[in-house]
Image: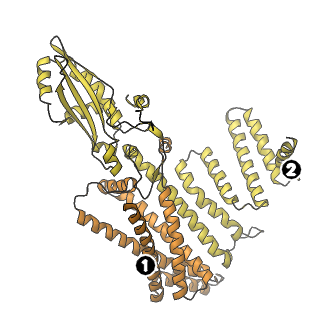
Chain colours: A yellow, B orange
């Protein structure tokens, strides 16, 4: 224990004034004072502390000649810029590696008296390959961001299986992801209940009988309902098809069942064709009360809900996504 | 921005594949350069590594700009292929395959071109630089740069063409074996 503390003390105790321990010590001092101060002063002290720890850590790296010092320094610079002016994380992640490569060039291109000169012939090959590799890594990071952007446009694809892709793998997020058919039907549900209630029973019965046997598309119903519900439009919405089919409820007189289906018409994998993770349905019952109709619906359900490993459906988690 | 990180899709397979493909083609191309160009073994590997990195970056940049300007219909095909490994509802299959083959050919020649011009510039970068003090020396250096852009050395072009053809066929062969294994 004592040894550990003396090691910690060594990290901050300056051996001489002009050393990295001075900066680390200053950083801790500024940090402690910033904790106990408020407002603008607190920000200034915190930033000063951050600058000090950056200088200190870079100095350690240079003195002990850690090979990854440029990456550390570049990361610290990026973090500092991120805190100072609110730049996107994406931009910072993309600048980090090229910045590190540029910093790594400095020892080759600047001599100890701070005179700029061209890197020596034998180190140029190494520097070109270093720079190229960092830019290639940046390309991979950018590809990652492009993938995320695509998923923001087509979020329902995530419920499918990416196993056949040569490019990407999914990180298992468990049953937390649901296709957009669920919120879509969830948004339609109050509109259905509102519009089909308190209608004249005769007209309602004729309308329902017109929906027998085949599923009918309902654009005149869906579009206005979604517009009213502040539904966020995404490119994938073109591939959701909402249909309705009616049937008489045999065990109860004067009651009809109306089933709404949200079907995915977009791309799906072989696996997705087999076990259909996309589609969802909503069952409504419309019954007669005096001369008017009353409609009430169940929660939206997935056609093929995900199951746990022992085969029980995950209904409890599903319920969260109905609203 | 925050919602982006809630999605869990990572491009690990393509990163592994590209790393292996790069190692593969650096080795093959270095071997062919050592046979056809007057370079030492060490230089061959360095040149080959540098220009392969350069061409990989060029292909990525080409892809990034392409996907930004693709019309939505084709972009959906791209997204479908990258995520699900298959295209979506192709109406005219012959034409589609033709376009894919053309695209791959274009990429091959893009890689050849980038590697060729990259090699010219790398030769200048790696060579002894003159002291750029007098106007004559500057003039001479400028002429060398212009020559690197305009002059085409047929021997170097053939070397790069064959090196690329060999490395890409080798990688294709590996993919083919992998795919065959997958389907049988």
Q: Residues within 10 Å of mark 1 (few under 14, many from 20)?
A: some
**Residue drawn at point x = 21 percent, y = 22 percent:** A196
Asked if badges 2 and 1 are on one and the same chain, I answer no
> Is B146 displayed left or right of B91 in the figure?
right
Residue occupied by mark 2: A14
Choose mark 2 or mark 1, whichever is in front: 1
Q: Vertical placement of B151 versus A188: above or below?
A: below
Residue occupied by mark 1: B165
Residue A220: percent from left, percent from top: 19, 34
Nearest the viewer among A208 and B5 is: A208
Which residue reaches farthest top? A290
**Residue drawn at point x = 64 percent, y = 72 percent:** A126
Q: Secondary structure at mark 2?
A: loop
Chain letter of disc 2?
Answer: A
Q: Secondary structure at mark 1?
A: helix
> Is B154 displayed left or right of A36 in the figure?
left
- Which quadrant of the figure contains the C terminus of chain A? top left
Nearest the viewer among B183 and B88 is: B183
Q: Vertical placement of B35 versus A58: above or below?
A: below
- Which quadrant of the figure contains the N terminus of chain A? top right
For residue B183, what is the image quadrant? bottom left
Residue B173: percent from left, percent from top: 42, 72
Chain letter of disc 1?
Answer: B
Q: CA distance from mark 2 to mark 1?
A: 60 Å
Nearest the viewer among A89 and A42 is: A89
Q: Vertical placement of B109 versus A160: above or below?
A: below
Which numbered dot is residue B13? Answer: none
């Amino acid at each position: 224990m004592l040894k550990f503390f003396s090691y910690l003390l060594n990290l901050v105790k300056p051996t001489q004034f002009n050393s990295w321990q001075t900066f680390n010590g200053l950083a801790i001092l500024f940090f402690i004072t910033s904790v106990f101060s408020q407002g603008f002063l607190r920000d200034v002290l915190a930033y000063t502390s951050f600058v000090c720890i950056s200088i200190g850590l870079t100095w350690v790296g240079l003195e002990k000649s850690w090979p990854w010092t440029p990456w550390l320094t570049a990361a610290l610079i990026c973090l500092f810029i991120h805190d100072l002016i609110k730049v996107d994380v994406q931009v910072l992640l993309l600048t980090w590696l090229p910045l590190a490569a540029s910093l790594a060039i400095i020892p080759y291109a600047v001599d100890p008296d701070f005179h700029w000169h061209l890197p020596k012939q034998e180190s140029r090959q190494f520097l070109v390959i270093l720079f190229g590799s960092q830019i290639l890594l940046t390309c991979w990071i950018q590809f990652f961001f492009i993938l995320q952007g695509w998923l923001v446009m087509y979020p329902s694809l995530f419920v499918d299986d990416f196993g056949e892709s040569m490019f990407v793998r999914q990180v298992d997020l468990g049953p937390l992801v649901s296709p957009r058919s669920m919120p879509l039907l969830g948004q339609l549900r109050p509109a259905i209940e509102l519009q089909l209630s308190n209608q004249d029973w005769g007209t309602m019965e004729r309308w329902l009988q017109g929906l027998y046997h085949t599923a009918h598309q309902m654009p005149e119903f869906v579009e206005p309902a979604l517009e009213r519900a502040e539904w966020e439009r995404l490119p994938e919405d073109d591939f959701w098809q909402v249909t309705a089919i009616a049937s008489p409820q045999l065990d109860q007189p004067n009651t009809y069942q109306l089933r709404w289906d949200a079907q995915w018409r977009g791309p799906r994998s072989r696996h997705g064709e087999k076990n259909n993770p996309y589609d969802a349905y909503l069952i409504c019952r419309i019954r007669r009360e005096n001369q008017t109709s009353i409609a009430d619906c169940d929660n939206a359900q997935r056609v093929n809900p995900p199951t746990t490993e022992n085969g029980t459906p995950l209904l409890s988690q599903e319920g969260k996504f109905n609203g | 921005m925050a919602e982006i990180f809630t999605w869990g899709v990572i491009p690990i397979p393509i990163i592994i594949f590209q790393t292996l493909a790069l190692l593969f083609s650096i080795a093959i191309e270095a071997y062919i350069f050592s046979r056809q160009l007057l370079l030492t073994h060490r230089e061959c590997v360095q040149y080959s590594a540098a220009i392969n990195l350069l061409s990989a970056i060029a292909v990525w940049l080409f892809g990034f700009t392409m996907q930004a300007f693709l019309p939505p219909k084709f972009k959906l095909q791209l997204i479908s292929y990258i995520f699900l490994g298959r295209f979506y509802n192709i109406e005219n299959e012959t034409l589609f395959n033709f376009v894919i083959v053309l695209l791959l050919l274009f990429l091959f020649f893009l890689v050849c071109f980038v590697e060729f011009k990259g090699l010219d510039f790398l030769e200048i970068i790696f060579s002894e630089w003159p002291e750029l003090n007098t106007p004559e020396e500057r003039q001479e250096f400028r002429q060398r740069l212009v020559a690197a852009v305009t002059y085409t050395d047929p021997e170097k072009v053939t070397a790069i063409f064959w090196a690329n053809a060999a490395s890409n066929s080798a990688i294709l062969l590996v993919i083919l074996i992998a795919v065959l294994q997958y389907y049988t």
